[in-house]
Amino acid sequence: MARHRREDDLAPIVEIVRRSADGARRSDIAKALEDMPQRTLQSWLRSLVEDGRLIQEGKGPIARYRL
């Protein structure tokens, strides 16, 4: 069963991106959120982009996320 994302789950990702002047790469976010599985992070980033809360620039590992 899929786990629903709560605002409390996504807020730390948005805050990391907010603090990054040049945008944050997935690897930067993963380092800050040490215990989050990569697949979960990918899924949540995709969700934030689809919801219009983050902007993705580029693709793959070099993609940067901005507000």
Image (cartoon, grey):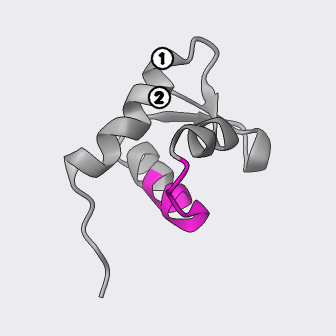
CB under 8 Å between discs 1 and 2:
yes
Segment colored magenta:
34-44
Q: Secondary structure at mark 1?
A: helix
Residue 49 locus on image (x, y percent): 45, 44
Amino acid, disc 1: Arg
In the image, taking residue 67 as reference, residue 9 lies left or right, namely left
In the image, taking residue 32 as reference, residue 48 lies left or right, namely left
Q: Residues within 10 Å of mark 1 (few under 14, many from 20)?
A: few
In the image, taking residue 47 as reference, residue 60 lies left or right, namely right
Amino acid, disc 2: Ile
At 60% across and 22% down in the image, what residue appears?
23
Quarter the N terminus occupies: bottom left
Residue 64 locus on image (x, y percent): 65, 32
Q: Secondary structure at mark 2?
A: helix
Residue nearest the viewer, comparing 23 with 28: 28
Q: Residues within 10 Å of mark 2 (few under 14, many from 20)?
A: some
Marks 1 and 2, how far apart at CA: 5 Å
Residue 3 locus on image (x, y percent): 28, 74
User: How many marks on residues?
Assistant: 2
Mark 2, residue position = 16
Mark 1, residue position = 19
At 40% across and 46% down in the image, what residue appears?
48
Asked whether residue 54 appears in the rendered view, the answer is yes
Quarter where residue 44 is shown:
bottom left
